[in-house]
Amino acid sequence: MLNDDLKAKGITPIVVAGKDVWPLKLPVFALQAKILGGGDQQKWIEGVWKGETAYNDEEAVEVLEKMKTLQDNYMIDGFMGIDYATAPSYFATGKAAMLADGSWDAPTIAAANPELKFGYFPLPATEDAAKNASFVGKYDVTWYAAEKGPNKEGALKWLEFFSEPENYTTFVKAAGFIPTQDNIQTESDFIDNELTPYLGDFELAYEIMMINRQNIGEHLAAEGVHTEFLAPGGLYKTAKELADIQQKEWEAAAPK
């Protein structure tokens, strides 16, 4: 196993910015997409709302168990104290072999160490290599014009201007995002050569697909499955304990 081989050579396998919490979701997204619903997380999410699946069913616990394995055994010591702005420097300077991050940080890494040659691979969530070989995440960002905003017409005109290929290309080059428009040349070796091959079966991240109940508890807040609550950083020693709490909070938030 790659992670064990790295550790045997004295190399820390993974760095992630646990202090800001949300970066812990990045590896979890792949686990959820490939495991929940047997690889159909939309089906699993619909099942949660219908009472046919649950946050403490076998698949959901498997997601937490695999993330706990990464956190316990392969992440850099003290990852819960590393902030998001600092994490790329650990990778760029060779303090960890892998970084759980988004494509937008590729320019940051390249700037920190112009000599570093780095790439991308999807987190292998299952034993099926073909099933693992697709990108799970979020395209670009989402833009809205408020229906009852003070200047809806102006906002729409700005979005039209922003969407012009020349302007949008400038944006994606600066931000490091994967373009959502066709025929945009990013001139980024990382996006064009490392990410694009995995985009054929692109899958949306769980938090984009999931709609939460109102007044949900902290262990499920913001459409997330919060693995920071797992030991050693959190109180729950096993994945099942946390899964049971999550299911309890989901049920408690149900309309009465």
Image (spheres, grey):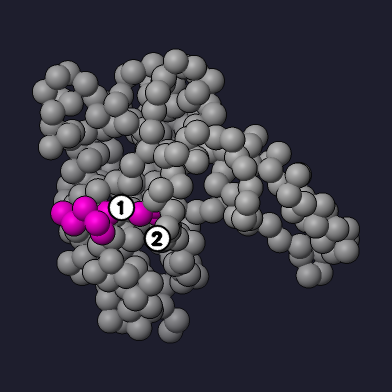
| Secondary structure category for the residue under label 1 | loop
Residue 158 seen by the camera = yes
Query: Which segment is the magenta one?
Result: 126-136
Tell whether 43 sits left or right of 8: right
Q: CB under 8 Å between callouts 1 and 2?
A: yes
Where residue 95 sits, quadrant-wise, is: top left
- Position of the C terminus, as image quadrant, is bottom left
Residue 133 has which mark? 1
The residue carrying pointer 2 sits among few (fewer than 14), some (14 to 19) or many (20 or more) residues within 10 Å by Cα, namely: few
Percent coordinates x, y for residue 141 in the rendering: 61, 52
Q: Confirm whether the magenta stretch covers residue 82.
A: no
Residue 248 seen:
no
What residue is shown at x 30% (from left), y 24% (from top)?
96
Is residue 92 shown above or below 230?
Answer: above
The kind of residue on which mark 2 rests is Asp
Q: Residue at x 27, y 76 (%)?
A: 53
